[in-house]
Amino acid sequence: MRDAVRNMFVMIELELRRLRHDRTELYFRAVQPVLWIVVFGPVMGSVRGIPTPGNIPYTDFITPGVLIQSTTFLCIFYGLMMVWERDSGILKKLLVTPASRYSMVIGRSMASGVRAIFQGLIIVPVALIIGVRFYPNPAYFISAFIIIFFASGGFAAISILVASFMKTRERFMGIGQAIIMPLFFASNALYPLQMMPQALQYFSAVNPMSYVVDATRGLMITGDLTNLLVDLAAIAVFDIVMFILASISFKRIIE
Amino acid sequence: MEKTGSAVDTKNLVKVYKGETRALDGIDLTVEAGIAFALLGPNGAGKTTLIRILTTQLKPTTGEACVFGLNVTREGSKIRRLISYVPQEMSVWTDISGYENLLMYAKIFGIPSQERENIIHEALENMGLDQVSDNLVSTYSGGMVRRLEIASAMLIKPKIMFLDEPTIGLDPSAKKVVWARLTNFKKQHGVTVFFNTHYMDEADLYSDRIAIINRGKIVKQGTAEELKRSIGGEVILFNLRNTDVSEESLRRLRSVETVKDVNLTNSELSILVEDAETSLPQIMDLLRNEGIKTEKISITKPTLDDVFLKYAGARLETSGRISEVTQMRRMIRKG
């Protein structure tokens, strides 16, 4: 256990050091979510076709959803890096260190949360400029980022799981899209759950992204925390299940 | 099969990939502690598979393997505390500095923080990288990257180092430097060095013992001297003008009394004899009768390549292989 925690911090430090040298990836990845907030949000909002809870502006409503979508994107493609590292010798070498394999999986997954937080920190100022009103409570805001950090670990673990079945990077690129888009569109990121067809609502109930969006929306925008405990429990279960599955499948990456 | 004196011990080790490719086909190998051991063989011989089993990355299909008496299948985590390993492929992060790479590995190895600084600087100095340690690895040359990888294997003082093609893609002078440092490190800390190579000169110069591996089998082992002596005599090498030499002619050549071995690869006919001066006239006559025209004749003492040729029945084809691997490393560097 101590090993796992130490490993996690080493992997997080590695990500921080990488980011210190080069943040271009984060800037480019911010382009898409910024377009959602700056273009899609105001345009759709002016239609007034989508009822939002408490009648908050539509752009405010989707900001947490877009934020989570972009951090999830980042985390899913983090698994790609594991495939890359398998092609290179890094993974082989890491596996020959005393660190246990599951600590490697959890450590790498959580490290993606670091990138996610930085990504969020790029998007939030843009949202502020466009006039999104965040809930004025710093403690809520910080909590939202902590939730993003932990949820990112689970999404990165999904990508490790999928990466363990993909033998090439090219294949993974397509699959990455195929995972994220359904998660995004069949969640409450862009519209309230009640607007969705019944079948999608069922899917949304097991879609981890919905819970993450709900929690961060409550903390960042509406201040409505009635579902927070359910959301947190769902995210915790999601993380644990994904860590276990990813650790089991991790063997496949090596061989 | 627990032998405390040996660093590596394998018994009838077999590895079959996906139920078909037989990468290792019954390897019996014992490596004494404290020596430099070379596993010499061509591409696809099973060298990397063997190293990956010994470093606990892969499980053997059947058979047993032990590192310092610890079983690779059952006691992997104990083995991982004793060994360090440099894979054939690039194994450092290119988007951080050389120093940071070693720092990350030092932390993963659990080296206490007060010792870290010294150990890292020592390893960097050992590999001659102290001047560039703060530069991004993406600015390093291939040789510098390889030196950094070896430096990271020196962070802990392992009981055994597994090096998979340690000097691949290095120019001769860099190769020499790396080996001088490795030899020094081995002497200083009593480390066993187990390395794979397809460079004969490397096996010849830097190992205490060599095992020749081909198609998943150890075909011969001993010191470089022993191996060369085992085939004895001298090698007469003919460069032929025509390459279509019949089996019948080869058979006749082999039946000459003084001829110990005959091998034909492309247009090179190499004949192993006890004494070249006395056998040459007889062989020349025979070649002329068979209508085989020669372009050039040279006489040499046997090299490890001749040893390999004799026991594995093929030349170690090196040139194509090197460019292939350097190309791959370059591709990986570009990301």
Image: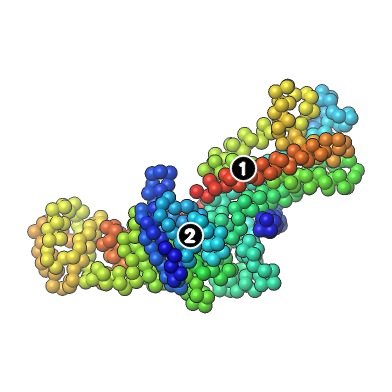
Judged from this view, the residue extending furthest toward the right is A136
Q: Is mark 2 in CB contact (under 8 Å) with mark 1?
A: no
Residue found at the very far bottom of the displayed protein? B188
The percent coordinates of residue A105 (x first, y second) are 63, 50
The residue pinned by badge 2 equals: B71
Does B145 sit left or right of B40 as displayed?
Answer: right
User: In the figure, is residue B335 to the left or right of A32?
Assistant: left
Question: Which disc number belongs to residue A118?
Answer: none
Name the mark nearer the viewer: 2 or 1.
Answer: 2
Q: Are both tags, 2 and 1, on one chain?
A: no
Which residue is found at the position 70% from the left and 43% from the top? Answer: A239
Please state the horizontal and vertical placement of residue B285, each as a whole percent of the image: 9, 64
Q: Which residue is mark 1?
A: A245
Find residue B232 and report its horizontal and vertical position in percent. Answer: 23, 71
On the question of residue A199 being in view, the answer is yes
Query: In the rendered image, which quarter is residue A195 located in?
Result: top right
Q: State the residue at coordinates (67%, 33%).
A: A181
Q: Nearer the viewer, residue A57 or B55?
A: B55
- In terms of image quadrants, where is residue B226? bottom left
Q: How many marks?
A: 2
Locate the N terminus of chain B and report the quarter of the image it occupies.
bottom left
Q: Amino acid at mark 1?
A: Leu
Please indicate whether residue B84 sits to the left or right of residue A197 in the image. Answer: left
Q: Residue at x 22, y 65 (%)?
A: B237
